[in-house]
Each structure stands twice: as C-alpha cells, then as structure tokens.
Amino acid sequence: MKAAEAAHSPADAPTAATPNPLQDQLGAWTQALDAFQRITSAHSAAPQPSLQFDGQMLQALQQAYVREACELWNQGLQPPADRRFASEAWAQNSMGSYAASVYLLNARTLLGMVEAAQTDEKTKSRLRFAVEQWLAASAPSNFLALNPEAQKKAVESRGESIARGVQNLWRDIQQGYVSMTDESQFEVGRNVATTEGAVVFENELFQLIEYKPLTPKVFERPYLVVPPCINKFYILDLQPENSLVRHLVAQGHRTFVISWRNPDDSLQDKTWDDYVGDGPIRAIEVVREIANAKQVNALGFCVGGTLLGTALAVLRARGEDPVASLTLLTTFLDFSDTGVLDLFVDENFVKYREAQLGRRGVLKGQELASTFSFLRPNDLVWNYVVGNYLKGETPPPFDLLYWNSDSTNLPGPMYAWYLRNTYFENNLAKPGKLTVCGQKIDLARIDMPAYLYGSREDHIVPIGGAYASVNHLSGKKRFVMGASGHIAGVINPPAKKKRSYWTNEQLPRSFDDWLAHATEHPGSWWTDWSAWLEPHGGKLIAAPKAYGRGKYQVIEPAPGRYVKAKA
C-alpha cells in the first residue's frame, strides 16, 4: 500500500526549520500500515484504499506532544493513572514511572494520528485496531528490564520468580496458548458442568443431554437449549450457583441441552446445512418425541441462536410449527452491525478462507480463541504474559476462564459459508436470498413469541446487532438489555444481586430510540425472563421419573463424552 503525503496547504505545513518530532513516527507508521494492509488483503490484486493525513491535526498533535513531554518533568515523574502501572513498585522507581508516562504519551499521539488519517471508515478502524494491538504489546510492563514490579519480585524471591516464569513459558509453549487460569483445578463433570442428567441421543454432530427435574411437577412443554458450536455448552452450567441450566430446571422446565461435538478430520466436510438439519432441527424432533409434546420452547445463545433462527426459518418454510417460544441471547440474525469483528472481513479475506477451507478442512479452535482474546489484548493476553512469565505466578482458578481456554474446532465448509453469508454479505437477513436444507428462508416467517437479550458492553455481538433482530421476526417480541459483556452479562444469576437490566415495551426500529425511553431495573434479567417464559410452558404435569422415552434411552451420564474432547 502506498500512503500519500499529508494533504494540507503550504500555510499549514511546518517549515524546514521547524522541529517535527512526529516526522519519524509518521514515516514508521505508514510503513507499518503498508505491511498491515498487505496482510489483511493477502492474495489480492484489488486496489488499496488511499491514505492521507490532515495537516492541521498533525501540527496540533506535534505541539501537544512537545508540551506534554516537557510537562512530564514538571510533574515530578508521578506514576500515571493506568492499572498496568498501579503498584507501589512503579511509584518508587523514577525510571519506571518515566517509561510508563512516555509510553502513554506516545500511545495518545499514535491514536491521535489515526484520527488524523483521511481514508474510508473501515481502513481507519483497521488502523486503530493495529495501533492498539502494537501499543498493548509494547507497554513497558511487558518487559522485565522495564517492569520494576517484576524486578522487585525477582530480588525478593532470589530469582525463583524468574525460574517459575521460564517454566510457565515453556508449559504454555507446549500447550500452544497463554494460560489464563490454573486449569489443573478443573475437570468437566467433576466441578464444572455438574448439573445431574443423562445423554439420551447422539449423532455425529451433537449429544442431547436431558437434565433431572428438581421439582415434583414440570411444564408440559420441554425446553431445548442450543449453545454456540464455537464454544462448549458448559458456559451455561459452570457451577450450581451460576448455572443457567440449573436455573431452568429449578423453575420447572424439563430441560434439554445440545452438546456439540468437537470436530476432527472425520467432520471436515460438514456444512452449515448439516449443522442446521442435523443440529437444532433434529434436536427439536427428538425432544418432542421424548416428551410426547406437540411443541417445545427453545433458546439459542450466540452462534447457537443464529443456527436456531435459521432452523426455525427452515421449519416455517416447510409449514411446520414445532416451537412455541423463542429466546435469543446475544445473537446475530442481522449482521449489519458486527462491531470490531467487521475489521477482519472483506472480499479478499473471505476468498482466502474459501480457498483454504471451503471444500474440506478444520478451522482450529485455538485460532478462534486467539482472535477473541486479542479483541481485549490487555485483559486477555498481556495481563497473563506479565503475571505468568515476568512474575512467575500461577493464575488463580476461575471457572469462566477455564471454559474460555477449552476451545472448539469448526468444519471448514461450515465456517466458510457462515463467514460469507452472514458477516460479509448479511444474506440471512435478506428474505428469500438463502436456500438452507432445501428451503428458501425468510426470518419474517418466524412468528412465535420471542425474548431477545443483548449485553450493553458486548464486543462480540454489539448491542445494536442484537437489537436488529426485532426488525426481522414477526411475532410478539420483548427486548431486554443487560449490563456488562458477552458472557458476564448473560451469566448473571439473581442470587448475586449484581448489575442491572433495561426494558422498554415499545420496539422502535433503531436501538438508540429504544434506549432513549428504556427503564433500568436493579439485579438480573433472569427474573424478567422467567416471568416471560412461564406462560409459554403450558400446564404443569408430573415430572418424569426416568430419562428418555421409547427408543431414546440413556447412553451415558451427563455431561457426556463429546464435551470432554479437546481441540
């Protein structure tokens, strides 16, 4: 990519005699941008976006840089207000404080240069993302020679922290990812995914788990949960006190959950159609047969919600109506607002992935996990680099981070189809555009009551993207926004009495209009959802005394063997 000279009039330009401390940074940055663009547009002969810089903004940045650099000394080298440099060791080390302050000044300046770039919005967003990644990686806290806190620990431990850090580094190199928690403290089925149940059906894509009732009576309509296939289902069943699965069972719902298989080479030719037809559609059929029910209630979470929504559109196109109510948690049906993930998707990237995986192959789970981690690099990458390797610490046990590290593969053809038809072309939201399982699908045919949830600070499914579903589903809808992010916002049991949620009985077309008149409520959205769900359960009947029914008998105890397979 060739970057143009900064566009400004001669009157705005610094003269030859004017010192310009940003000149070298600008030259280096345009070279880095050139490399970044070549990577993101690999194998492409398409014209590259033009890049110019606003001269007045650059000049203002230069003046601010010089002024703030001088002020650093006048402030007496106080430690900056950044949690990476918050320990007492930084405050007591003048060189450490100075290095941190200069780093933050350079960070502000580089991000200001991004804002001075005159280019299309997607290119600017890519610039911003690249700069933020570089800044996160280059923080002085990430280097032993510049980190007084790590140095102090090394001295106090007589070098033991450095020895442990090398051991931690070697272990993580062997396992292929940075440890976020002490994984030795967890075992699926022992202290995560412990809600009592049994596997009552399986095919090559999933196992179906039925959970033991906790109430003497249950609603006549069973409840099917479709988790994302890019993660393991037990995010919904971590511990008894924060298990959404256990919450459903305790509310009197006869609950079934799909546990997706972790694909290996034997599934490398599986498609989106396979995942829809042999996934939610097959699960709905099996649950109805086991419960002897005409209809079920169903929930989809994240990509599981996209699969479930597609499946319901297929069933409605066939004239079938097996689902009484729908719940979608942080789910895209309309991919017009995908947030930061949009940075990675363009025609060149999609074609590259199609050539690589479109016919057969497996997308490794660790690649997806790394991508999501680097969306929040300071929290999910460099924080652990510093703790594990520079300080020689073992991260504390945390069930959610154990689940986050338990990655899942995807079949290449399924992934390539999903990438083009959702994130890139948004075809799922276009009536009649897609044929899935032999049916032209239209989301407007999904006309059962729907409960739609989005998290306010979600960086994976932005709140506007979650809200967009209200403009496509044709049944009676309720939209609720919860506090926090993609996972913490969803897994928010009422007993914790944490966070809050927002409601608005009106559903205008835009999320901003909805939010302007929304009402905040303290606590968990689970209570609102439970009240909404109860009337859709039907009458109460005696709880079953055994798992399965007829040809669907117990295969093995929950959580089953599929969830235990490692990527």
Image (cartoon, rainbow, N blue to C red):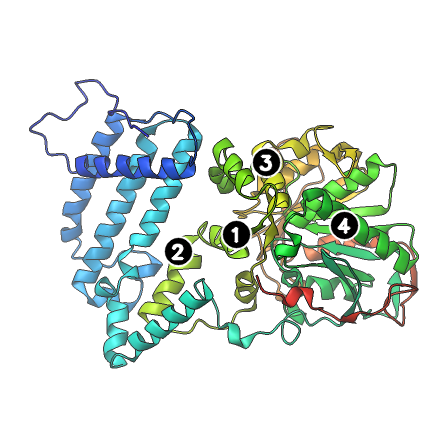
Q: CA distance from mark 3 to mark 2?
A: 30 Å
Q: Residue furthest left?
A: 17
**Whole-percent x and y of residue 26?**
23, 35
Query: Which amino acid is tagged 4?
Result: Asp
- The vertical placement of 232 against 390, above or below, is above
Identify the residue at image location x=28%, y=70%.
150
* First-in-chain label (1 vs 2): 1
Residue position marked by numbered label 1 in the rendering:
368
Q: Does 71 sit left or right of 198 as displayed?
A: left
Q: CA distance from mark 2 to mark 4?
A: 39 Å
**Whole-percent x and y of residue 353?**
53, 40
Element assignment for label 2: helix
* First-in-chain label (2 vs 4): 4
Q: Residues within 10 Å of mark 3 (few under 14, many from 20)?
A: many
Between disc 1 and disc 2, the foreground one is 1
Identify the residue at image location x=69%, y=47%.
305
Q: Does 367 sit left or right of 496 as displayed?
A: left
Residue position marked by numbered label 4 in the rendering:
278
Residue position marked by numbered label 3 in the rendering:
420
**Whole-percent x and y of residue 342?**
50, 38
> Residue 378's mark?
2
Between residue 344 and residue 294, name the one nearer to us: 344
Residue 454 at least partly seen: yes
Identify the residue at image location x=50%, y=38%.
352
Between residue 87 and residue 165, name the one nearer to us: 165
* First-in-chain label (3 vs 2): 2
Between disc 4 and disc 1, the foreground one is 4
Between disc 2 and disc 4, the foreground one is 4
* First-in-chain label (3 vs 1): 1
Query: Which amino acid is tagged 3?
Result: Arg
Query: Which amino acid is tagged 1?
Result: Leu
